[in-house]
Image (tube, grey):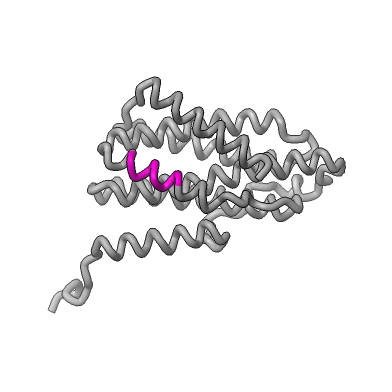
Amino acid sequence: MTASAGLRQITPLDRRLSVLGRSLSSLTGAAPTTRPLPVSSADRDLDEPTEPAQRRLSGALMRVNHVGEVCAQALYEAQALATTDPALEREFLQAAREEGDHLMWTRERLRELGARPSLLNPLWFAGAFGIGLVAGRMGDRVSLGFMAETERQVENHLARHLERLPASDSRSRSIVAAMQTDEARHAEHARRLGGIDLPTPARWAMTLAAKVMTTTAHHI
């Protein structure tokens, strides 16, 4: 008997159950991390923003960033589920794991600031999952192009947050800068894997959808 004789082949149901388990972990804050908070020892010794208005602003911006990571989990899990290429499935799941670090970093920073995650996170997750499935069903090159464009827009969004975060909030700024570096790398990797440039109307629609999400998550 060979060593693999007793192994059971992974079925579509197994894949769906795995996605469900990881999705619940993302929404409940139980997802594992592979990297610690990207905050140096010097940052740990700095004062937090002391003005109530500054803390509220930091909390609102980090809530928006947390929502973005909830959506990233949903998108990449859906795209991994939609592809029929096992290698590409692994790429999407690896991206989801790295975005999972961002998810927990932003959640921890919200806790430190005394702020809460968005009350609409289940809705954001469901919507992003549906979009990811649609992108995935349009073919791998389109799906990768969607990933690249998503990450490009998120990178620009994080750059704007770095401009808006209070100068005294070094912890949030360190987290956002580390996230921005990862997003740029994910976008470039998706392009190298064969992602196409999306048509202009698709990019505009993505920008509009992101604007609705970020504006709403800033408050709710």
In the figure, is residue 50 to the left or right of 185?
A: right
Residue 54 horizontal side relative to residue 10, left or right: right
Q: Quadrant of the C terminus?
A: top right
Residue sitting at the far top: 200
Of residue 86 and residue 30, the one placed in the foreground of this image is 30
Magenta residues (range)? 127-134
Magenta span: predominant SS is: helix
| Res 199 quadrant in image | top left
| Quadrant of the image occupied by residue 20 | bottom left
Residue 80 sits inside the magenta stretch: no
Residue at horizontal 45 percent and vertical 44 percent from the top: 128
State the residue in front, 46 or 145: 145
Query: At 28% from the left edge and 64% from the top edge, which residue is drawn?
Result: 13
Residue 98 vertical position relative to residue 25 in the rendered view, above or below: above
Coordinates of residue 32 in the picture (x, y in percent): 52, 61
Q: Position of residue 182 (x, y in %)?
A: 51, 39
Hey, which residue is sitting farthest bottom in the picture? 1
Q: Nearer the viewer, residue 12 or 99?
A: 12
- Residue 23 left/right relative to 194: right
Give the quadrant of residue 159: top right
Q: Residue furthest right?
A: 51
Tell me how many marks there are: 0
The residue shown at (51%, 28%) is 208
Question: Could you tell me which residue is drawn at 81 percent across and 46 percent down?
Answer: 48
